[in-house]
Amino acid sequence: MVKCSYCIKEIERGTGLIYVKKNGAIRHYCSDRCYKFNELYGKKASKKEIAANSPAGTLA
């Protein structure tokens, strides 16, 4: 299993989105929302958002 490049959530095999940049970098996203926020809008994930997606609600 891989982790989302934006929110660091675990992505199950066969789900999610893989984005390959022109320089060959591969980014994995769990949802279209994470892809849009990171690639199109250039936003960075906030610590609050990452903590909410962590299993125990704490930073990993």
Image (cartoon, rainbow, N blue to C red):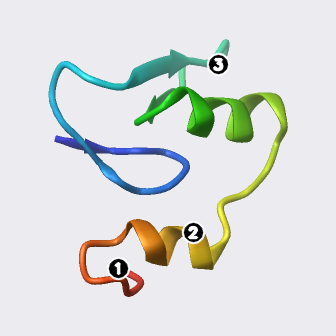
Q: Marks 3 and 2, how far apart in space?
A: 28 Å
- Quadrant showing the N terminus: top left
What residue type is disc 2 on? Answer: Glu
**What residue is shown with label 2?**
49
Q: Marks 2 and 1, how far apart in space?
A: 12 Å
Q: Marks 3 and 1, how far apart in space?
A: 29 Å
Residue 38: assigned label: none
Name the spot of residue 38 as percent of width and height, x first.
70, 40
What residue type is disc 3 on? Answer: Asn
Above or below, 49 relative to 15: below
Give the secondary structure at mark 2. Answer: helix
Between circles 3 and 2, the one closer to the viewer is 2
**What residue is shown with label 3?**
23
Asked if residue 1 lies left or right of residue 10, the reply is left
What residue type is disc 1 on? Answer: Ala
Name the spot of residue 51 as percent of width and height, x first.
46, 78
The tag earlier along the polypeptide, 3 or 1, is 3
Between circles 3 and 1, the one closer to the viewer is 1
**What residue is shown with label 1?**
60
The local crowd at label 2, few if under 14, some if 14 to 19, many if 20 or more residues have their Cα within 10 Å, is some
Above or below, 9 relative to 37: below
